[in-house]
Image (spheres, rainbow, N blue to C red):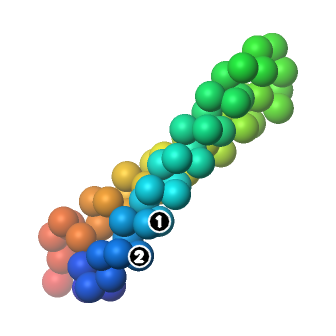
């Protein structure tokens, strides 16, 4: 799939947005010590950080075909 290789500007903006929002959510959840909602906010932030990493690595993957 060449979509991520062809649309570099879109890829960089999505990665940047996911990274910044993910870090904000992780730190905001961390400040809610002892609350279950803080843990859920941190998990959403973690998912966004992992999604940013996945989008970053997508163009470098070997095609299996």
User: On the rendered image, what quadrant is the C terminus found in?
Assistant: bottom left
Q: Residue 31 carries which label?
A: none
Residue lying furthest top in this view?
34
The residue that appears at 29% across and 67% down in the rendered structure is: 58
**Is residue 1 rendered to the left or right of residue 38?**
left
Q: Is residue 43 visible?
A: no
Residue 51 versus residue 35 in the image, above or below: below
Residue 3 image point, x, y percent: 32, 85
Q: In which quarter of the image is residue 35?
A: top right
Dot 2: within a 10 Å radius of its alpha carbon, few (fewer than 14), some, or many (20 or more) residues?
A: few
Q: Quadrant of residue 29?
A: top right
Residue 63 versus residue 60 in the image, above or below: below
Q: Total marks drawn?
A: 2
Residue 59 versus residue 56 in the image, above or below: below
The residue that appears at 52% across and 57% down in the rendered structure is: 17
Residue linked to disc 2:
10
The residue that appears at 56% across and 44% down in the rendered structure is: 22
Residue 14 image point, x, y percent: 47, 65
Residue 6 image point, x, y percent: 26, 85
Q: Is mark 1 on a helix, strand or loop?
A: helix
Q: Residue 14 carries which label?
A: 1
Q: Can residue 27 be seen in this view?
A: yes
User: On the rendered image, what quadrant is the N terminus found in?
Assistant: bottom left
Q: Quadrant of residue 63?
A: bottom left
Residue 28 versus residue 43 in the image, above or below: above
Q: Distance between the residues labelled 2 and 1?
A: 6 Å
**Is residue 44 rendered to the left or right of residue 53?**
right
Q: Is mark 2 on a helix, strand or loop?
A: helix
Dot 1: within a 10 Å radius of its alpha carbon, few (fewer than 14), some, or many (20 or more) residues?
A: some
Residue 28 image point, x, y percent: 70, 30
The answer to whether mark 2 and mark 1 are in CB contact below 8 A is yes
The residue that appears at 44% across and 56% down in the rendered structure is: 16
């Amino acid at each position: 799939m060449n979509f991520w290789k062809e649309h570099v500007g879109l890829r960089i903006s999505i990665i940047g947005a996911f990274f910044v929002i993910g870090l904000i959510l992780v730190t905001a959840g961390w400040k809610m010590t002892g609350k279950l909602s803080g843990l859920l906010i941190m998990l959403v932030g973690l998912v966004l950080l992992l999604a940013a990493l996945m989008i970053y690595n997508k163009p470098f993957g070997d095609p299996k075909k």
